[in-house]
Image (cartoon, grey):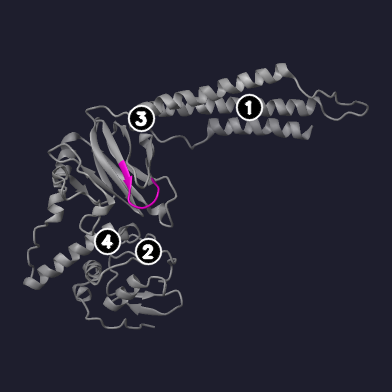
Amino acid sequence: MALAIALVAVVAATVLFHVFSPWWATPLASNWQQMDDTLTITLIITGAFFIVINLLVGYLVWRYRHRSGQRAAYEPENPRLERWLIAGTSVGIIALLAPGLVVYAKYVSAPRDAMQVEVVGQQWQWSYRFPGQGGALGRADASFVTPANPLGIDPGDPRGQDNRIVNGPELHLPLNRPVKVLLRSKDVLHDFYVPPFRARMNLVPGMVTSFWFTPTRVGRFDILCAQLCGIGHYNMRGQVVVEEPAAFEAWLARQPTFAATQHPAPAAPAAGAGASVTDMLAAQGKALALSKGCVGCHSVDGSVGVGPSWKGLYGSVQTFSDGSSARVDDAFLREEILTPQARLVKGFGPVMPTIPLSEDELKALMAYIRANGTTAAAAAPQAGSPATPAR
């Protein structure tokens, strides 16, 4: 009897929780109302099965409870009941699957006039690419990936020369225009997910996946990675900025073309030729940090992620997990980059892999970190002096 009451209470509590729960879906910001409709159908069907089955079990437990002097009738099979169960279950499964298959077929069939954007995932960051004036995306392949070409665009493909490159977490899109999203991964399985758009798709290494949607509301919407992709998975975030078409076109025009990133204009010297060389080396380091995935763990705006922020790092004093400390100079950076597991900065785990770097790449990366230092004096390169202990 107690079990039957408990089952009825569970059903009642579940229904009440659903009705009064504050955890509803985020407001829809795309054309995919059908996604919500299929979820509603799934919820109704599974909810009905949940209620009926649990109430039936509760009734059977009560109806056929133990009573002295009574014995249960032995009935090994009931063909009529089995036929009803098979038919009811089949109808329920078809009702669950059919709407989803219909919607998915539309979800991956973009309109002919849809604007294309490529999303590239890498531990733990997002990058984007738009077609240029030619209206086509150039060929891309992992074999073309270099520090200066982190998206692996084929330098010999003329269609890719005017492609607009966005090396950052923020993606701008125009309002009320269909967008076909092409997705690829440079390392492991990722998932591009924007909850208010009801849009998501896996990024599978070695292949290009796609879906489409139409943004219907102006605003900023979080991008999440919905596949566990490593220790920094939680930090693989970005934002979609939906804006009026004119504002989008102005933003897109400010993004560099692929050709410009391969042949950047020389930096204007601030104080003689030395400053220009330093600026160019830091620019190479920035490209390297993007291509190697460093920015997925180390920010340059002061926010703390998987690893320490590079803003103000150079010249500061860092404490290690064993209680010792040292000033961040070139020797400190060299040791931490080349042997990241040798000692750990306090508050951070042993998650940084050993990344193979040439001596020139190492110098460029250190120049970029120096460029984000606290002061001009601290940012001046130090000629290989050992890390200064500071206890």
Q: Secondary structure at mark 4?
A: helix
243 in the magenta segment: no
Q: Give amino acid for label 3.
A: Tyr
Q: Quadrant of residue 150?
A: bottom left
Tell me the CA gap for discs 1 and 4: 54 Å
- Residue corresponding to mark 3: 107
Tell me the CA gap for discs 1 and 3: 32 Å
At label 3, counting other C-alpha atoms closer than 10 Å, the crowd grade (few under 14, some 14-19, many 20 or more) is some
Q: Give amino acid for label 2.
A: Gly
**Labelled pair 1, 4 in contact (Cβ < 8 Å):** no
Q: Quadrant of the N terminus?
A: top right
**Labelled pair 2, 1 in contact (Cβ < 8 Å):** no
Q: Is residue 389 above or below residue 295?
A: below
Q: Secondary structure at mark 2?
A: loop
In primary-sequence order, the first of circles 2 and 4 is 4
Nearer to the camera, 120 or 32: 120
> Residue 307, labelled with which disc?
2
Can you tell which of label 2 and label 3 is closer to the viewer? 3
At label 4, counting other C-alpha atoms closer than 10 Å, the crowd grade (few under 14, some 14-19, many 20 or more) is many
Q: Tell me what residue is drawn at x 57 percent, y 34 percent.
A: 17
294 vs 342, left or right, is left
Nearer to the camera, 178 or 201: 201
Q: Residue furthest right?
A: 69
In primary-sequence order, the first of circles 4 and 3 is 3
> Residue 51, labelled with which disc?
1
Percent of width and height locating residue 13:
63, 33
Q: Is residue 172 above or below residue 236?
A: above
Tell me the CA gap for discs 2 and 1: 48 Å
Q: Which residues are magenta?
A: 183-190
- Residue corresponding to mark 4: 289
